[in-house]
Structure formats: structure tokens, C-alpha cells
Amino acid sequence: VSVGAQQSEYGIVIEPGALERTGAITRRAVSRKARRVALISNRTVFDLYGGVVEKSLKALGFEVLVFLIGDGERFKNLRTLSSALDFLTTQRLERSDVVLALGGGVVGDLAGFAAAVYMRGISLIQVPTTLLSQIDSSVGGKTGVNVTSGKNLVGAFHQPSAVVIDPLTLRTLPERELTAGWCEAVKHGAVGDRDLFDKTVSLLKAKPQSPERMARKLSALIAAQCAFKASIVAEDPRESAERADARSRKILNFGHTVGHALEAATRYKRFRHGEAVGYGMLAAGEISKRLGLLNPDGLRLLSTAVQACGPLPTTRGISIPDVIQLLKHDKKSAGGEIKWVLLKGIGQAKIVSGKEIPKDLLLASLQNAFQFQL
Ligand SMILES: NC(=O)c1ccc[n+]([C@@H]2O[C@H](COP(=O)([O-])OP(=O)(O)OC[C@H]3O[C@@H](n4cnc5c(N)ncnc54)[C@H](O)[C@@H]3O)[C@@H](O)[C@H]2O)c1
């Protein structure tokens, strides 16, 4: 991945068994002076994969210091960040040393932010272990934490020195986490690339296969997904407020406007983020169709793809007027105006101002999208 004007470059290694090569990959990616690695993870992931990662780092001469955070989104906060920074400080990590994030997006965002601000930035290795983090959050350099008034409101851009992706880690991932990850994979295809969309859907429908075959096919798909994300990030590394074209980083928010509102309407208890994005994509698809941007076949393809991701929690009991009210708080709005990411076709995004979407059209679109149940 080559990012931005400073030409910061890093490699993404994707292969079954890659965890065993973490030490070698880290050694090549960071300063020759690096001696110590602060391995940040949580208990769940560390118990499963900490041993192999630690062993491979030690084999390459690194001293490994382990810091575990709580498991869950609620631990992605300033208090956890502060204790992680205390850990790095008391262990006297030096400028040439390394932070390694082993886990899903929560660990990656928090450890990444700690690496971004400790001594104004030290090297970071991302070792993502959820589907979402393997295709999305570990690539692109966004790091951060949640604060009381909102998610991801405090953070920094800090590109990793390398990303190590082992698809075999997905074998232990709970089913709902896989569904959430698949929804984000469908999102990438839907906004960016028809070929990526087709590849994603065909692998989704091909389940189940032998674990080895699946891991090989998954590696190829994760690579295609990362390449897509990297291509968007390379051109718009800091999500420029000025850009609203079909290749701007904003298109990655497809499904997120309604998704965030659904999460907020259910107090972040009912949906995994990716599941809410599943409904959000259907809502954006409906709006696109009703505005005459997307043809009915395109919407059908999108619905089939979302269905193939896995069962989504029910939307029963959620008030649509409440969701519409919550849309106004979307943090991606500019000057108080919602910027909708819609579709002109599968693989073709278009950013549309909220002013161009009549209220009754929005209401009818949400009604239709939320009726979708498996
Ligand atoms: N930085 C970015 O660009 C970006 C992009 C998208 C999302 N995010 C962030 O990512 C976070 C969500 O990440 P997530 O979906 O990976 O959730 P997560 O990190 O909470 O992981 C989900 C659950 O799976 C467990 N787990 C992780 N790997 C496992 C494995 N291999 N086997 C068994 N269990 C495993 C975790 O312990 C956790 O309980 C959110 O905070 C979101 O804001 C960041």
C-alpha cells in the first residue's frame, strides 16, 4: 500500500499460517534498532493466538511485552488508551520499538492510536483477526477511540508498517462477527467494483467448503478487498472534506448513515455494526432505486448479497421516525447536511445531498428496507 504525498508504504501479507511469520515480517518492516514489541490484544484473542505470535517474534530476537485490554467496543475509550500509554511509558518503550495490535477492529483502533501518540508516533504492526478488520479497519491508517458524545470522535491517522493477515484465524470467529464482516465486504464491492462484488457474493454462496480450500479462496478475496480499500485510501488518505466524487474515501460510508442511526436507536445493543450496515445498504439501495439512479435488477442483486451474508437481527419495534431523527446526527454530515452514498449501479457510487431526497421517499425506502427479514 502506498499512501499519500509522503509516500508512506507498507506491505500486507495474506496467507493461511501467516501468524507464524509475524516475527520475520515485523523484522523486515521496522527499524533495525527495534528490540521490543508491545503486543496489545484482549484475553479472548490472546488465548487463541498470542502464543504463536509471541513465539515467532521471540525467534527473531524481539523482547515481547504483553498488554491486554477488555473485550468489547465499550473498552475502546480514553481510559483504556491512558492505561495502554502508561504501560508503554513504564516499560520505557523507545522510539525505534514497536506496537503490535493482535485482534479485531477494537484492539486495532486502540493500539493504533496508542502507537500514533506515544512519543508522537512509533511503528505499528496490525495483525487483524476478524473478517471486518482483515478487509477494512487494519488498512488505511485510521485509529482512535470513542468518547461519551460519539464513536470514533478522537483519533489520528497513523499508517502501519505492515499488516499480517492469517485467514485461518477466522475459523474461531463467532458466526455473527462473520456476518458483520461479510456485510462490509459486500459494501466494498457495491460501491467500488462490480468484479469485487461478484467475487464476494460467489464465495459467500459457495459456503461450506473444506476449511483448507475455503482458506485459500478467502486469502484471494481478502487480498482483492484490501487492494480495493488501499486504492481508495491511497488517493484520499485523510478523507478530504472537499471531495465528493465516486473514488473519494466517503464512498466507504455506504450503508453507514442509516446503519449508525439503527445502532443508536437500539442503544448499540441489538446490532453488530456490520449487521446495521447490512440494513443501511438496503435502505440506500431503495433510495437509489426510487430516485431513478439504480435499476430494480441492481437492487435485487444487492438484497441477495446482503441475505447471503447471514441472518440479520430483526428491526421489529424500531420506530422509523426515530431513525429519521437520528439521521440528522450523522457525524459525516457537512454543514448540517447529510451526504448520502447511493448507487448508480453495482460498483458505482454517487454522493447525493440529503436535500435532494424528499421526506416521503426516505420514509418509504426505510419501510421497505426494514421489512427485509430472512
Ligand atoms: N479504523 C478503521 O478504518 C475502522 C473501519 C471499520 C471499523 N472500525 C472499528 O472496528 C471496530 C469493530 O471491529 P470488529 O468488528 O473486528 O470487532 P471486535 O474487535 O470487537 O471483535 C469482535 C469480537 O470477536 C473477538 N475475536 C476477534 N478475533 C477473533 C478470532 N479470530 N476468534 C474468536 N474471536 C475473535 C473479539 O474478542 C470480539 O469479542 C469498531 O470499533 C469500529 O469502529 C475501524
Image (cartoon, rainbow, N blue to C red):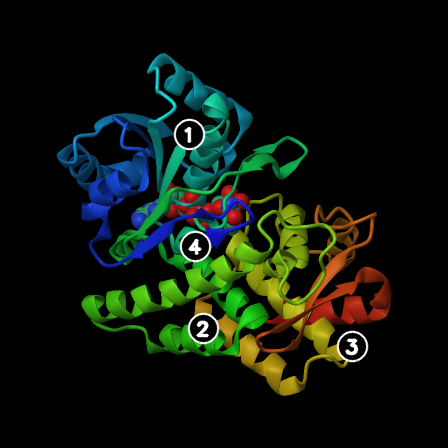
Mark toward the viewer: 2 or 3 = 3
Mark 4 element type: loop
Specify the amino acid type for callout 3: Leu
Mark 1 or mark 2: name the one nearer the start of the chain: 1
Mark 2 or mark 3: name the one nearer the start of the chain: 3
Mark toward the viewer: 1 or 3 = 1
Mark 4 or mark 3: name the one nearer the start of the chain: 4
Mark 1 or mark 3: name the one nearer the start of the chain: 1
CA distance for labels 1 and 3? 47 Å
Q: What crowding class fits label 2: few (fewer than 14 Cα within 10 Å), some (14-19), or many (20 or more)? A: many
Q: Which residue is mark 2?
A: 308
Mark toward the viewer: 4 or 3 = 4
Mark 4 or mark 1: name the one nearer the start of the chain: 4
- Residue at the top extreme? 90
Mark toward the viewer: 1 or 2 = 1
Specify the amino acid type for callout 1: Ile
Q: Which residue is mark 1?
A: 122
**Residue 308 relative to residue 289: left or right:** left
Q: What crowding class fits label 1: few (fewer than 14 Cα within 10 Å), some (14-19), or many (20 or more)? A: many
**Residue 85 relative to residue 192: left or right:** left
Asked whether the beta carbons under mark 1 and mark 3 sit within 8 Å of each other, the answer is: no
* Residue 34 image-quadrant placement: top left
Is residue 125 visible to the viewer in this orientation of the structure? yes
Mark 3 element type: loop
CA distance for labels 4 and 3? 36 Å
